[in-house]
Image (spheres, helix red, strand yellow):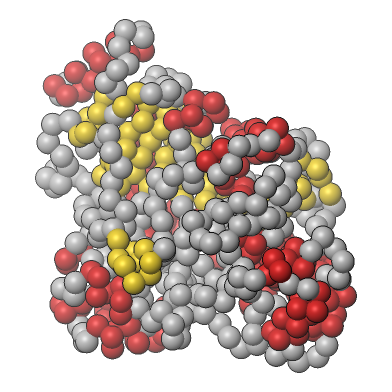
Amino acid sequence: MEVLTLIYLIYMIFVNSGVSQQQPVVLTDCGPVLGTNSTTFVFKGIPYAVPPLRDLRWTPPQALSKTGGTCWAGTFNASTFGNTCIQRNEYNQSEIIGSEDCLYLNVWTPTLNTSANLPVMVWIHGGSLQLSNGNRPTFSPTAKLANSTNVVYVSMNYRLHAFGFMALDILTARSLHKTSGNYGFMDQQLALQWVQRNIKNFGGNPNLVTVFGQSSGGTSIIGLLASPLSKGLFHRAWMMSASPVYNKTLVEASKDNLVFLKNTGCSDTNCLVNVPANDIIHAVPWNVYPYWAMSDQMDLPVRNYFDGAICIVDGYVVPEPPFEMWKQGKGIDVPVIVGTTSQETDLHPSHSDINSWTWDTYHKYVHTYLDTFPGNISTEALALYPDGVESEEYQYTSMTSDLRVTCPNNIMSDILSKYFKSPVYRYVLTIWPSQPVNVMGIPYKAKYACHMWDAIGFFGSISSYYKPTKGDQSFEKSIQKEMVHFATTGKPYTQSWKTYPTSTGLLTTNVTVVSSYHAEMCTFWKDNDFFRYAWIN
């Protein structure tokens, strides 16, 4: 028996007998890791891949290996979070933050008993595949959450922006799989492989893993559900506010990204891998097609204005468009919950003065955008979202959210329900914050059921924004109860919440089950071919 293994087994005897829990050490396949113990056990910044630097830039991630000499020596100190992946600072987009050396994951667990077999929930953070990290305050798992729900939580950082999703012919040419792009998805899959190999030593059940993600974290899950490389890596999926338009091919994306290549001044990969990381980010086509800034996503669309796609159908990670994969029975057939919020775009409306609009202003902007489409779209839309309901802000963000997010996610849920043998559930979060809330640190306060509010509720983070009311607390407890039950059993807690399209759950302080949500509106947007204008990424 290896010395480290023997030491670990002796240590676990003490841990499980309650003798010492001050310095938790867990053995992984790359060596022991030292965590911290507060209300639960926390292990931060565990490396799960070789840093993707220099010649490893824009290649599939490589797992750490003892035989390959890439593991750490001794005991790894997992007391601080790993580097954030390199990205634009969302509060100052001219500033670059983070590092290319960023493939780290975190574990929060209420027990180190290897026979506990607790459900495992793996968080995939959002941020348009270009921002954020797996340990963002108020928007990631916590020790308190692990303790109160009795679940093992994992989060990871994965490559973002140009480093995670650049598709180019010259990158494809050097690839063993003759593809490029979607490196961030491969990072996620490698982290999930790590979970399969190691999570039992953290008290988790490797056969009861739920992936959950919000916004582009939800979009990531669409890719994972369509990827043969995901087989056996997870057993439930909960996606929030995902982007179901997922059709851009490798050829199309590689052509779109030629503007990036021109901006770098490179013509081969030897040049590209040596371009300074900050220059790579600045070379991305931010405000010219393919519009990586995606500044229109929180507003009504303009006819024939489309952003470029960052995640793509690359032919390897995602062999075909996800809808086609699922229709052919090639998807990862596991229980799924698809969630959206009723006023997604109220997080950060494109019009900063929207809270002072009159109904005439509301009409003006609906006509400004929707009159670019043929027919009588704007007038019919205004009839479906009439004056006098709550406020102009409420109606405009409801209309925009239905068109961009809610109704497209219904279409995706229909396809999943039809072609998956596993159950598929659908919810719309309709509870409002009890007071206007500034979620993203931007000079705007959301009033309604905005983007991210379901994730913030699940993480129990409302108290970080304002003093929660009893209603806020009931909402947090309710969504935690529903989703932990789903992670454990494959079904939500509320028994009357049936599979889609039989019912849709409306999430407030509890779950109200309805036969459909905004069915007339969604039929209108679908019949007029607005699915193409759903959120991208």
Rendered position, 509 above or below 246: above
In the rendered image, residue 304, in percent from the top left (x then y), is placed at 61, 88
* x 23%, y 13%: residue: 10
Rendered position, 183 above or below 488: below
In the rendered image, residue 338, in percent from the top left (x then y), is placed at 65, 53
Rendered position, 115 above or below 238: above
Say left or right for 16 vs 101.
right
In the rendered image, residue 277, in percent from the top left (x then y), is placed at 23, 69
Say left or right for 369 vs 212.
right
* x 30%, y 76%: residue: 282
Using the rendered image of the protein, determine whether residue 412 is visible from the camera's viewpoint. no
Q: Nearer the viewer, residue 471 or 69?
A: 471
Say left or right for 120 vs 346.
left
Q: Nearer the viewer, residue 285 or 491?
A: 285
Question: Residue 299's quadrant in the figure?
Answer: bottom right
Using the rendered image of the protein, determine whether residue 506 is visible from the camera's viewpoint. yes
